[in-house]
Amino acid sequence: MKQRLLFLGPPGAGKGTQAQQLAASKGLLHLSTGDLLRAEVQAGSELGKEAEAVMARGELVSDALVLAIVRSRLAQQAASGGGGWLLDGFPRNPAQAEALGQLLEELGQQIELVVLMELDDGLLIQRLLGRGRADDNEAVIRHRLEVYREQTAPLISFYRNKGLLQSVEAAGTVEEIAERIGSLLD
Ligand code: B4P
């Protein structure tokens, strides 16, 4: 089974929802940069203070901050014997993707599958408005979608060209989507 995975897709596609379930059922390390940043905000750390306003505007937190978080978690896991991981919401731009490539080379690891979750803007907006997190109001959601198109969407061809990308239709029930993703792992 493929066990070094990356979830890509627009905000609200359900990356977090699917990643959490899959990681729990397969015993993978679930690394959500969004969750980790929100935990820092909640803890009131220096890092959290820096991230809070940026996240509220729907923009991307600095690469250096996010990379430091990911590097320490992946290195820690590799040092304790390795195992599978699922990166959710990272990388989010080409610079992060390059940095991830370098980090994995240092660790002697490789991405085995990139899952692209695809969904129409109308449904994305509906889902996020329904969730109602601090950064889930309509103006900020629209800005996050623009940021996705400009900065994150270029990763689709980046990973497709490496032969790693598989797309999944992200409309339907959580169970249906989980089944579609599960069928890509063997
Ligand atoms: P994230 O935390 O990554 O969140 P997201 O993209 O908005 O949502 P996701 O796609 O995970 O959707 P979810 O499953 O929750 O990013 C938030 C912010 O953090 C970014 O804007 C940025 O500022 C910062 N950040 C994160 N990573 C970064 C990085 N690498 N670099 C820089 N900045 C970074 O689902 C959404 C909703 O839909 C939920 O309410 C869920 O219950 C619902 N839902 C899910 N599946 C459904 C289904 N099948 N049917 C109906 N509803 C469904």
Image (cartoon, grey):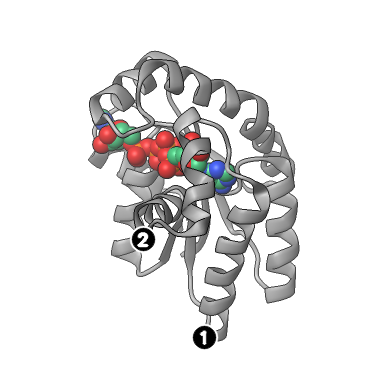
Residue 165 x, y percent position in the rendering: 60, 43
Task: Name the residue located 55 percent from the left edge and 62 percent from the top edge.
Answer: 69
Which of the two residues, 115 or 142, is positioned nearer the viewer here? 142
Vertical placement of residue 2 versus 150, above or below: below
Farthest-out residue, bottom:
80
Observer able to see residue 153: yes
Name the mark on residue 81.
Answer: 1
Name the mark on residue 23.
Answer: 2
- Residue type at mark 1 is Gly
Observer able to see residue 7: no
Task: Name the residue located 50 percent from the left edge and 86 percent from the top edge.
Answer: 80
**Which mark sits nearer the N-terminus, 1 or 2?**
2
- Residue type at mark 2 is Ala
Q: Secondary structure at mark 2?
A: helix
Q: Is residue 165 left or right of residue 185?
A: right
Q: Is residue 152 left or right of residue 8?
A: right
Vertical placement of residue 124 versus 81, above or below: above
